[in-house]
Every structure is written in C-alpha cells, then in structure tokens.
Image (cartoon, rainbow, N blue to C red):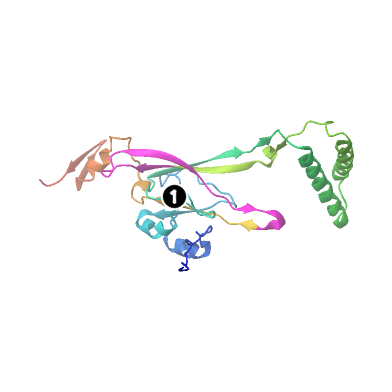
Amino acid sequence: MDNKIVNKPAKREESAPLDALRILLHKQAITLTPLLNQVSELPVERELEYYFVPVQYMEQYKPYYRPGKPFKNLKLVNFDKPAISLSFFSKHKYSIERNVTHGEVMLHLKNFRDELLNKSLMQQLSAGQQTELKQADSLLRTIRDQPDAYQACLSNYYHYYRYWYCTYRYFDDPDQTKTTTSSEHLLKHTERIKGQVHERLNIIFIDPHYISRPVPHDHKLVDRELDNYPIALRQGITTLYLRKV
C-alpha cells in the first residue's frame, strides 16, 4: 500500500509587513489638503494611521488585497475604486451587556480592587481612590454572600471609543460618467494589556486629477466635455471653448 504524502495548503498570513509597506508609502503617498482638494477636514488622531496613494501605484498593492479574509493589521480601504472626493466622520462605538453573570461581576470587582491595592503599594491613594477601594471591598463581600443583591450590566460607553469612517466617491463605469459613494471604517492602533500596541494601517487610493477639482453630479460631467476644447477664452462670466475640427 502506497503511503501518499498529503501537502496541506499553506496557512495564510494574518498580518501584513507594515514596516516594508511604510518604506514604499514614504515614496508614493501624497498629502491632501481641504479646500485645495476634494477632501473634508482630515482626522488627527494618534491611533489612526492612514495614507493617500495615487491610483497609478494601486496595482503594486494587489498582493495585499484579500476580499473576505483581509489582513488584521492592514486595510486597503478602496482598492479598485480610486476616490475623486473624500470625507471623514467618527462614531462613538460602545456596547452594553445586560445579561451579566455573578462570576463576571465578582471578577470585575476583584480586578478593580486589586488594581487599587497594587497602586497603593507604589503611591499614596487619593481620597476618591480610598473611597472606591472601601466601596469595592464592601461590594465584594455583599455580592459574594447575596448574589441577587444587585442588578448589573457592563458597558464601555464612557471609554468614548471613536470609530472613524471614510466616505469616498468614485467613478463606477468605464466611461467615467457615473459616480457612486461608499463608506468604510478605518483600522486604529489598539493598546492591549501591559501597554503592548497593535499597529494597524489604512491605505486610501485616490485619483490625483479629480481629487483636485470639483466633479459635477452624475450624467452632468460637463468638465469632461470641455476638456476636449484646448482653447479657452474667458470674457466676463462666459468662456469660449474652441477646438479644431
């Protein structure tokens, strides 16, 4: 009986080589400016890393384009859909968990108390922290003995985590006469336990020509027609456009 060797498919990498990509981006990425370009006020946030790359370089990033299973640390925001205008907005992202178990309540209280105790070994606790420590001790004893004494929920509402979105407009037909608008959320650097930072990078592809000039509404791209007239003579509010027959 032959012993067949079965080759398992290579495991996909979960993370893209950000350091190597940053070297490439340093040469290719450009700066966009509100008013001069068709872009809203840009997000300024330490945890958000993003770059604008002209469409002529887009094909070089194709090896990193994995629809359905993207890299965890890299987002090609609008691959194959270079933006002709951009805007950014943020949402306050939070969750509320109402079905909290007795064990989860006890664990949270214990961790909260232990953090204050450890801090007291290094520095003097403030009056407010001393009150919180006494309160945590009291609650631990009460809820341990009377699990139904309190109703509980868990939420990160007051952490005020902002989730950034990029809305971009792009041509969606070969003749570049129709446009569509889409939105994508952006990846942020995240900090884990013990201060370890997980870096995440966003690449936004842009059309350098149209990002620098207004684009009319769908089916009304008059500027495309007027580009075919090389001679322009302006008088008052009217311009005469001419081209040889």
* The stretch drawn in magenta includes residue 176: yes
Going by the picture, which residue comes out furthest to the bottom? 2
Q: Amino acid at mark 1?
A: Pro
Which image quarter is the C terminus in? Answer: top left
**Range covered by the magenta-colored residues:** 168-196
* The stretch drawn in magenta includes residue 169: yes
Relative side of 194 to 216, left or right: right
> Residue at left 71%, top 34%?
99
Relative side of 98 to 57, left or right: right
Residue linked to disc 1: 67
Of residues 5 and 223, the one nearer the viewer is 5
Going by the picture, which residue comes out furthest to the front? 1
> Residue at left 36%, top 43%?
170
Q: Secondary structure at mark 1?
A: loop
Q: Which quadrant of the structure image shows residue 149?
A: top right
Give residue 110's position: percent from left, percent from top: 82, 46
Of residues 179 and 194, the one nearer the viewer is 194
Relative side of 64 to 193, left or right: left
In this rendering, the answer to whether 89 lies above or below 30 is: above
> Residue at left 36%, top 57%?
59
Give residue 194's position: percent from left, percent from top: 72, 57
